Image: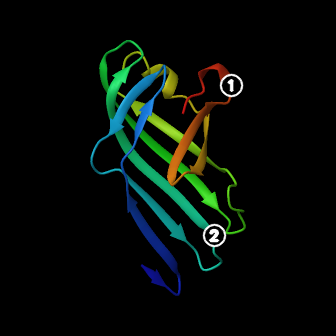
Amino acid sequence: MRCPYGAISIFPFTGRVCSPLFSGETRPGAVDVQEENPAGLRRLDARYIFEGTDSAGLPCLLYVENDGVLTGYEKPGEVLCAYPRFMTDSATLGPYLSQARFRSELHLGSGELEIWVYDVIDEHHSAQ
């Protein structure tokens, strides 16, 4: 939707993650909402739930909210930084993932979007 006051775009998507901490696939309903103001500043807000297994091999759900901003001046191939939040029913991952210690990078390569998540305090826990 576009109007004189801005624009809203909604993109449903699917995805998967495979890391030492968690492996799984998105459940139906994953969506990326992009809100653009009249000046061209675009706010990204992706929300989704993964269903999979935690590092202990137990089944769990992992909710992700990943927020970022596009200025409209990004160059092709430039990495977009965003800020993810997590919530999980995994007793193993919950205490770690509930902390505000993560950043993410959005990489567009070979037609697919890759999101790399980094622990800004302990880079040894970084995962794609």
**Can you see residue 122?**
no
Foreground of the two, 53 or 46: 53
Rendered view: 104 above or below 73:
above
Quadrant housing residue 91: top left
Q: Residues within 10 Å of mark 2 (few under 14, many from 20)?
A: some
Who's the residue at 67% across and 50% down the image?
79
- Find residue 77 and report its image quarter: bottom right
Instruction: Judge the density around disc 1: few (<14), some (14-19), many (≥20) Cα neighbours within 10 Å.
Output: few
Q: Residue furthest bottom?
A: 4
Where is residue 8 shown, x and y percent of the image?
A: 46, 72
Which mark is on residue 41? 2
Q: Is residue 24 above or below residue 43?
A: above
Residue at 63% across / 75% down in the picture?
40
User: Disc 2 to disc 1, how far (Cα)?
Assistant: 29 Å
The label on residue 104 is none
What x and y, as percent, mark residue 41? Answer: 63, 69
Examine the rendering and report whether any part of residue 114 can be seen.
yes
Where in the figure is residue 27, as x and y percent of width and height?
29, 42
| Kind of residue indicated by mark 1 | Ile
Residue 121, disc = 1
Of pointers 2 and 1, the one earlier in the residue sequence:
2
Q: For this rendering, which residue is in front, 5 or 47?
A: 47
Mark 1, secondary structure of its residue: loop
Residue 36 figure quarter: bottom right
Left/right placement of residue 16 relative to residue 105 reads: left
Left or right: 121 in relation to 43? right
- SS class, disc 2: loop
